[in-house]
Amino acid sequence: MGPAPSNAERFVSTKAELRAVQSGPLYKSEPKIYPREIKGLFTTLRRLSTVVLLGIFYLVPWLQWEGRQAVLFDMPARKFYIFGLTLWPQDFIYLALLLIIAGISLFFFTALGGRLWCGFACPQTIWTEAFTWMERLTEGNRSQRMKLDKAPWSLTKFGKKFAKQFCWIVFSLFTGFTFVGYFVPVHTLSSEIVTLNVGSWASFWVLFYGFATYGNAGYMREQVCKYMCPYARFQSSMFDRDTLIVTYDGRRGEPRGGRRRGSNPQEQGLGDCIDCTLCVQVCPTGIDIRDGLQYECIACAACIDACDQVMDKMNYPRGLVRYSTQHALENSSSRAVRPRTLIYAALLLTLIVVFAASLAMRNPLILDVIRDRNTLYRDVGLRGIENSYTVRMVNKDSDPHMFMLSVDGVDGIEIASNVDFRIEAQSISTLPISVIAPHENSYGGHRIEFTLKTTDGSDISVTEESRFRGPAKEN
């Protein structure tokens, strides 16, 4: 060994390296990843998940429910239709509860099973799987795609690339069309597209979401997971040593090395890993699971399927790469039931019960009473003192009802106009009304209550408070 470098030499070397880094490009493009196709249990589950979730996404807008689209977020009418449920702007609390439940669910399942969402249900994973399938269909397997990209342009290469781009663009536009179909009646939207009479906003959003799908799933792929997705950055806060993760058993696999099939690795001083790199070749994010847990890992478990096949060929037991926990790898007991999961489960169960109960007890009536502030009161002679109001009534029920409006809070108070009327299903009625109270009971200010209730036997009612103003009482 030579003499150790001096501080001056070390400084010069560091300075040179820094200058080289500073003179280099600010951005280095990532090399394209060619994930190898593989068969196995987890690959089958992931493909099944892709088919089911994409099927739900593309088919649900076409479902009908009682003469209307089953799921429709009608923004102009400010109504969200979800099968038999209609949500209004006043029901925003339910959307907030759903988002909180989704967040707690993510924490709970992550604490239990790691990034199951990323590997099997995330839209980025699902659409990337679909785009990769179209790429394999038009350009061939992994080695064929790599050769095609390196080959000079020819008629064959152009034809394959054109076929892939055609499939991607059509699929992306259909995705954008389907997404907009959740906000615009899909039958109306499809007829407008056929007749080339689509509105500017509908066209913009179809193209926008189509382009987003094309870019994210066609080109960016793993870069969305590695650089754009925030979940990968804070997932470690939800992990502990009992969280189920995709992991490599280093004690069993090391040291790595090639060998003949059927040979005894212990006799050669080797572990079970033959260093075939298949686990890297099948990884959609291009990582080596043997380097340990990494934030780029989306837990798709493709490496497990690849390694199990290699172990079968070598007559070694499966599980060199497997779903496990840090405690299990250390030969310690692993606990699925622990304080973290119990707290998440309790919160999740409580929120689901609260959501279901509040939805079941939701009052289908809304009553808003707005007092006329331009005129405090009017003296209508022998009839008494009159106040004017604007009453806004919302029937959120799926059936029309007959209603009666009444007022209480002052002796002798009554509504001067007709108080019996009909409100159609899921509609709003706004009426100006006058309320009159006797002179002797109307001095000063009074708190009154308006009650709207059905008169057709459905026994639904709602009450709203307001104020009644009269002249000041003379001393």
Image (spheres, helix red, strand yellow):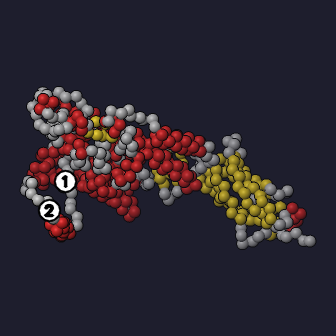
- Vertical relation: 210 (above or below) 241: below
Choose between 187 and 376: the one closer to the eye: 376
Residue 439: image x %, image y %?
87, 64
Question: What kind of element bears circle 2?
Answer: loop
Q: Quadrant of the C terminus?
A: bottom right
Q: Nearer the viewer, mark 1 or mark 2?
A: 2
Q: Is residue 198 visible?
A: no
Q: Locate residue 110 relative to residue 403 in the image: left or right.
A: left
Residue sitting at 39 percent across and 45 percent down? Answer: 239
Dot 1: few (<14), some (14–19), or many (≥20) neighbours within 10 Å? few
Residue 207: image x %, image y %?
33, 59
Residue sitting at 11 percent across and 37 percent down? Answer: 258
Residue sitting at 80 percent across and 65 percent down? Answer: 445
Choose between 298 and 13: the one closer to the eye: 13
Label 2 sits on what residue type?
A: Pro
Residue sitting at 41 percent across and 42 percent down? Answer: 111
Per the image, the residue denoted by label 1 is: 32
Which image quadrant for residue 36?
top left
What is the number of the mark on residue 90? none
Per the image, the residue denoted by label 2 is: 5
Q: Quadrant of the N terminus?
A: bottom left
Question: What kind of element bears circle 1?
Answer: loop
Q: Is residue 73 visible?
A: yes
Q: CA distance from mark 1 to mark 2?
A: 39 Å
Label 1 sits on what residue type?
A: Lys
Q: Locate residue 353 relative to residue 460 in the image: left or right.
A: left
Residue 468: image x %, image y %?
78, 63
Choose the circle earlier in sequence order: 1 or 2. Answer: 2
